[in-house]
Image: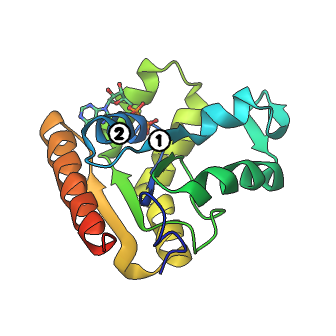
Amino acid sequence: MSSNTSSKGPVIVITGTPGTGKSTHAQLLADESPIPLKHINVGEMVKERGLYEVYDEEWQSYTVDEDKLLDELELLVAEGGVILDWHTCEIFPERWPDLVVVLRCDHALLWERLEKRNYALKKIQENNEAEIMQVVLEEARSSYPEEIVVELKSEGMEDLEGNVARLVDWIRAWQGDHTS
Ligand SMILES: Nc1ncnc2c1ncn2[C@@H]1O[C@H](COP(=O)(O)OP(=O)(O)O)[C@@H](O)[C@H]1O
């Protein structure tokens, strides 16, 4: 069980390979949630607050300073009512999330989305392969209890709307369980 049972809102992790739709889902969920939720784009936070050790030019990515990042996030998570949006989740302590959503996307569609972002070919290939091998899903399953990990398809607008409606229902149920 999460440590956030008495807090003002649940802690929801939205994870998945880059391009699967995490930020799109997190933003819509924050807009539609019956409880105010703060959308934390962890990748942006790492960049803005300098929570990294080096920037790797070759892979166009940051090597995150995990201790610093966890210290910053701990304060936000302790308050509750947050969506943690990141392409990896295993560094978040098991006690943090009430729900871990893993978004999935057909790899050919994902390739197109990442091309539109002008990612280098090598980075597109790496992410494409990670999606095929369901790396993030396995990571989530090995880091958190089975019952809080949910795999959702994110290929079209109907998926997005259906997923967010389902998550809003989950938040209402959470609210019911945590209101005395
Ligand atoms: N379910 C979906 N249906 C249609 N387009 C989507 C869906 N999910 C994401 N997209 C599109 O794919 C791109 C990547 O989405 P984004 O939310 O930025 O992914 P992530 O945060 O996982 O990197 C965006 O252009 C977004 O509009």
Residue 38, disc = 1
- Eyeballing the image, is 80 above or below 17? below
> Which residue is located at x 23 percent, y 41 percent?
155
- In this rendering, does residue 60 appear at all? no
Which of the 4 quarters of the picture holds residue 48? top right
> Which quarter of the figure is the C terminus placed in?
bottom left
Amino acid carrying label 1: it is Lys
> Tag 1: Cα neighbours inside 10 Å, few (<14), some, or many (≥20)?
many
Could you say where residue 35 lies in the image, as x and y percent from the top left?
32, 49
- In this rendering, does residue 56 appear at all? yes
Quadrant of the displayed image that contains ligand 1: top left
The one of 88 and 31 positioned closer to us in this rendering? 31
Which of the 4 quarters of the picture holds residue 108? top left
The reply to whether the C-beta atoms of the residues labelled 2 and 1 are less than 8 Å apart is yes
> Which residue is located at x 76 percent, y 31 percent?
49
- Asked whether mark 2 and ligand 1 are closer than 8 Å, the reply comes as no
Residue furthest out toward the front: 180
> Which residue is located at x 75 percent, y 36 percent?
62
Could you say where residue 154 lies in the image, as x and y percent from the top left?
27, 45
Which of the 4 quarters of the picture holds residue 149? bottom left
Find numbered disc 1 in the image and state the secondary structure of the residue it sits on: strand
Distance between mark 2 and mark 1 Cα atoms: 7 Å
The one of 141 and 23 positioned closer to us in this rendering? 23
- Eyeballing the image, is 74 above or below 64? below
> Which residue is located at x 61 percent, y 50 percent?
76
Could you say where residue 171 lies in the image, as x and y percent from the top left?
28, 59
Question: Circle 2 is placed at which residue position?
Answer: 30
